[in-house]
Image (spheres, rainbow, N blue to C red):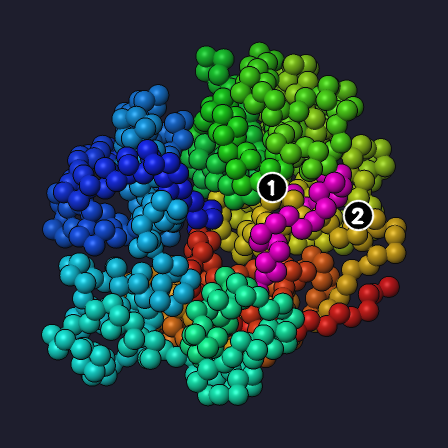
Amino acid sequence: MPALTIGSTLPDPPQTSEELLAVQNLLARLQTSLTLRRVTKRNSVRRRTVSLTADGKALEYKPTRKSRRQLLVFRDLYEVTKMDPASKVYKKAKLNSNTNVVVEMNTRIHRGWRIVFDDKASANTWLQMIGYKVKGGALAPSGAVPNEDTLTGCICATWERADTNRDGKVDLKEAKKMMVRMNVEISDDLLADLVRKHDASGDGALDLEEFTTLFIQLTQHEELRPLFASFAAQVDWMTRAEFDCFLKAQGDVPSDILFNTLKPDKNSRITFTQFVHYLLSPCLNPALDPAHQTGVVDEMTHPLKDYFINSSHNTYLSGDQFQSSSQIEMYRRALLAGCRCVELDCWDGKDNDPVIYHGHTRTSKIRFVDVIDTIRRHAFTASPFPVILSLEVHTSDEQSMVMADHLRTILGDMLMTAKDIPNMMYTPESLKGKVLVKWKLPHNDVDDAKEGLAGSDNDSGAARSPSQKAEASSQGALSHLLRSCVTVGAFKTSDWGRDAEPYYIQSYVETVVKELALSHRDEFIGQTSRMMVRVYPKGTRIGSSNYNPTTAWSVGAQLVALNYQTWDDDMRLNDGMFSLNKGCGYVLKPDYLRNPSGKAKATPCTITVTVLSGTQIPKPSLQKKGDIADPYVKLYINKRDRTEVKTSVVRNNGLNPYWMETFTLACESKEIDLLTVKVMDEDTTSANDSVCEMVIPVRALRTGYRAVPMKLCKNGASLPGASILCKFDIVDLPPQS
């Protein structure tokens, strides 16, 4: 299964003059060479001589077994972080986690380095150097890496990877490689003619400026010329007033900042190329309402039960449910991806040291104390709103007391305890910075056994035999000390939540929720309006596949827990839902789900989508070799099988494919439905490949001509510069009775 890649995580550049001096000294040493220790794929440590390339845009080293040098281009870096001291890498590589620091540097396709430093100061300087080269900043040089979201930025990025001898020029062979990497189909003869035409020096090679001019002329989106002409009186340019008219027709507010971003000439005019750049830029013209990207839009003062809460199932697992490794890193990744509810399956470990793993399976074990420490460090990096620890406790009284001690000692004031319940408002706003533990409250003997109405123990994911059930039962009353840490109570309602407190949670397996959504829909919506409901995958999903979360959301289930380690279509729906509200992990449920007896109803609507064109569509999984992409676009609402439509195929063109095809899709609930825009690559010899996609909540979809950004289907990595230009029109329909 493909793995989740969290949003780009890159370090900050130096913030003080002292830090800047340390970074400059490091760069000076790298200009000659620097011997570092690198952790290999087999977790052995090898010394490598690393240096800065002559142009300063990449790091390089020459391995002993490979003749060609290895490059790590700064622009390619996507995630650069310190590895968790509790990671097994330290133990396997025989490193001291108290003194050594491992910095992991990954690209969008996870080809990265792990560098070992002897102390935190050296590691911090290295991280600041990366931030300095990638992000720039107030103290950074004027030549900071340009934005890859622009066409020029994309050309620069590809240039750096193609100019392997770092001489500042590309010959015909290198230019051909660049065209292939940028998904441009062009004959050798035509490319040779173009190189000769743009080669001012006559040496058979192009510098960056010459190649950029060639490329832009070759790849103009001429199909958008009629749109430009409908607002511009002149063929070659558009005035500020004309551009403002276009914005108003889109429903946008004209802005000096926006217009100046397009770099108009001294007469306040922009060219057709600049207009196209605006249209295709997800940064300047996003399909998702920017308000949801820049701030928290929803009111955060409702009870927790009134929100959809981003949730993870068996968070510790890195792969399948039976024999994959349990990793502390998975908690960090989930929390940084906006997850607000993580799961901990707790068991007795050696030497009175509780562990977390998938019980009675071959999955590996990690220490409870290390997981809690990781949660402490990363809980509120991506969001200030509360984190819920969903405990499954299979420990003895003695080790449950150890768990309670770790919770209190490590989390400190972050931890909300049972004694705080009478004085605490259970709202995201009032619980900012707080960690809540979900298990049995002191006065409630109901265990959260992952069993719902019509469910079975087999639905827990780890099948439990009669002897295992007897073992759990024989433990008797578990530690009161652990219960005193619990502030979200596991509960089994007997009256659709009327007998529950708003901070109680009942867990249901996915199949039961699907059944209830059909047979007792109104009653179940009533229950989710009174208390919280957690949904988890059925036990037969041994491979850690996911289920479609939209069914559970449609009946108001708050915590729809998915296998975060699997980046599949269902996880992408989850990613789309929680792109709302600045990705804070909490989305306010619509009024008709919060107050089902009220007047509010779901708003059905139709969405008319015209798929115009695309830009910079990569090959599947960012492949460098192989045929040029043959892209087509799929559109669907929530469930592919019911609503899917697709465009025709454009042959041999991933750079600027053109479709101009219109479709109409029906939504049952504008408030919670999700629109998927997916790019496929047709393969005549095997199954078509999913390339990239974006899931957009309909409630935040902007009408007009909009750029839909793309994420790689393989792992969710963002694709700067890649977008699909669509025109959206939404028509609300009368609510159904």
Q: Quadrant of the C terminus?
A: bottom right
In the image, what residue occupies the spot 75% across and 27% down?
424
**Cα gap from disc 2 to disc 1, whole angstroms:** 19 Å
In the image, what residue occupies the spot 52% across and 48% down?
545
**Which of the labelled discs sits on residue 478, or is there none?**
none
User: Is residue 293 found inside the magenta-colored segment of the image?
Assistant: yes
Q: Nearer the viewer, residue 177 or 266?
A: 266
Q: Is residue 124 above or below residue 174?
A: above
Q: Nearer the viewer, residue 471 or 357?
A: 357
First to last magenta residue range: 287-312
How many residues crowd around disc 1 within 10 Å: few (fewer than 14), some, or many (20 or more)? many
Quarter assignment of residue 203 = bottom left
Asked whether residue 315 appears in the rendered view, the answer is no
Q: Secondary structure at mark 2?
A: helix
User: Is residue 220 found inside the magenta-colored segment of the image?
Assistant: no
Whole-percent x, y for residue 588 in the image: 71, 48
Whole-percent x, y for residue 262 in the image: 46, 69
**Which of the labelled discs sits on residue 311, or is there none?**
1
Give the residue at mark 2: 594
Left or right of 501, for residue 364: left
Left or right of 527, for residue 616: left
In the image, what residue occupies the spot 39% across and 63% down?
620
Left or right of 704, for residue 655: left
Q: Nearer the viewer, residue 259 or 663?
A: 259
Which residue is the extreme one toward the front? 266
Q: Secondary structure at mark 1?
A: strand
Comes first in the chain, label 2 or label 1: 1
In the image, what residue occupies the spot 28% across and 77% down?
214
